Every structure is written in structure tokens, then in C-alpha cells.
Image (cartoon, rainbow, N blue to C red):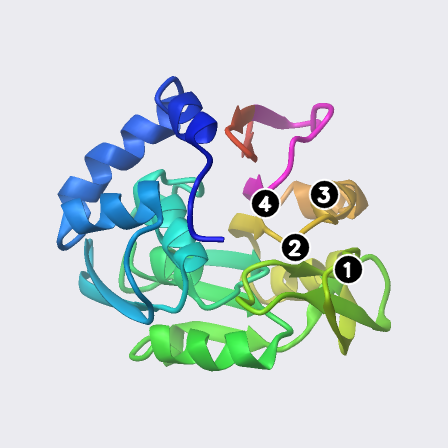
Amino acid sequence: MNKRPLIKIVKALFNKPFYVAFINIFKYFDRPLNVLRRYVFGKGTYPDKRILTTPVGRHEVSLYSFHDMITLVECFGKRDYPAGHDISCVVDFGSNIGISAGYFLTRNNNAKVYLYEPLQENIEKLKSNLEGFESRYELNGIAVGLENGTAEFGFEETGRYGGLQSDLPKTIQVQVRRAEELISEILEKEGHIDILKIDVEGLETAIIDSLSAESLKKIHRIYAETKYPGDLPGFKKEQYGEVVRFQKAF
């Protein structure tokens, strides 16, 4: 589906993220009017290449569907996962084709990003989109969950939507690693995590709840694609559209 329902477009006009995206599209995207046409009305053909202006220079991204354009605007336009120029360690659960990773990697020339994505087709696209950044990211072709092992992973043809707890038409067997275990391993190497981004289509709240108090002490921000029902001790909470943002309350 490449078109947004009219009611959804109208509702967006009353939300702050729409205006943040509108301004940033004209500031940082090439051919901004074409981006708006594609993003708002679902017009245009794919694949499509986009050039963005970033703190480290021009960044090219290949998009393969209207859904990838949505992701591009979410990351570089709406700024669903805001990152400062001083970040040094980011963990990205659900990296898809590397658009969010590209946003984090282009905030400065030093940030290290740990990526987790189980779909091989997405991984190939991710590697292409992150060409030139190979020395600053570590890619793991696994799913992130609550237990170690293997499990069925559901997905659909665009690759944007998929997860361990889904009823999507296609499924594959994937290796699964426990989120807390992965976070502990990264913290052992890095000492801290500036941003933990979670977009795993259904397990976001459960993953946040599974993190130990010891791990949470060393994570500065958590961004997750969910409407989190409560508070997280030690963090300030903001619900930004469909994304919950937690920032450490120092």
C-alpha cells in the first residue's frame, strides 16, 4: 500500500512531528518537494536514491519502497531518535536496511553502532547503504528477544515489518539472543551506551522491562517504537508520536 488515508494526513497536521519533519526535509534532504510528494501522497517509483546533508557530509541512501521513504523521514526528518554530535556508542535493535544506523553514524566521525537485523535481504541493503562506515559498525544477523535459541520470524515482502511475535505471511527460522545478555556484553566493552534504539515489531515493551537495573544505570537514552504504559525508574519519559523516549534523569 503506497497511499496514506486522508484522515491520517489531516491528523498529522495537528501533531508536532509533522512540522519538525517539514522543516528538516527542506534543510537536509535533496529535492525536498519530491520527498514530500512521496512521503505524504505515496507518489513515485522505487528503487530511489536520496542524498542527505549531515554533520559529516553528504550521505546517500537507497530506498526500495514507499515504506523505506517513511523510515527515512522518521529518522532524518521527524528525528524520532534524536542524537547529539557527542554520541560514541549506539545499539540498534531492528536495523532493517540501515537508515537509522546511517543517521547515528553521520552525527560525528567517531560513533560506534551495534546493529541487529535477522533478514538477509535487509542485511544486503543495509551494507550498501552504510558503505564507507564499515569500520564504525558491528553487524549481527540475529533477532533480539527475551530468550536465547531459535524461533520463527514473520515478515512481509518489503522487509520493513517483521518480528518474532507477528502473523505476517512469510516466516523463517532465525537465531535469537536475549536482549539483556547483548547489552551486558556491549557494556563490558564500551562502559556505557548513549542510545539504545528498539524497533522489533511487538517486543519493545517486554525488552525494556527485561533490562536489569545495573544495565539501565549505564544507558543514557532509550528510544522504542511503542506506547510504553508506565514510567522507567531513573529516566524522564516522553511519548513522541509512536515512539517512547526515555532520557536518563542525572
* Place of residue 22 in the rendered image (x, y in percent of width and height, measured from the top left): 24, 34
Would residue 112 be counted in the magenta stretch? no
Q: Between tags 4 and 2, which lies in front?
A: 2
Q: Give the range drawn in magenta.
A: 219-237
Callout in the foreground (1, 4): 1
Label 2, label 3: how far apart the Cα atoms are: 12 Å
Distance from the alpha carbon under mark 4 to that under mark 2? 19 Å
Cα–Cα span, label 1 and label 4: 18 Å
Indicate which disc residue 43 carries: none
Residue 184 visible in the displayed image: yes
Three-letter amino acid code of the residue under disc 4 = Ile
Identify the secondary structure beneath mark 1. Answer: strand
Residue 200: numbered disc: 2
Crowd around label 4: few <14 · some 14–19 · many ≥20 (10 Å): many
The answer to which image quadrant residue 177 occupies is bottom right
- The mark found on residue 145 in the picture is 1
Q: Name the residue under label 3.
A: 208
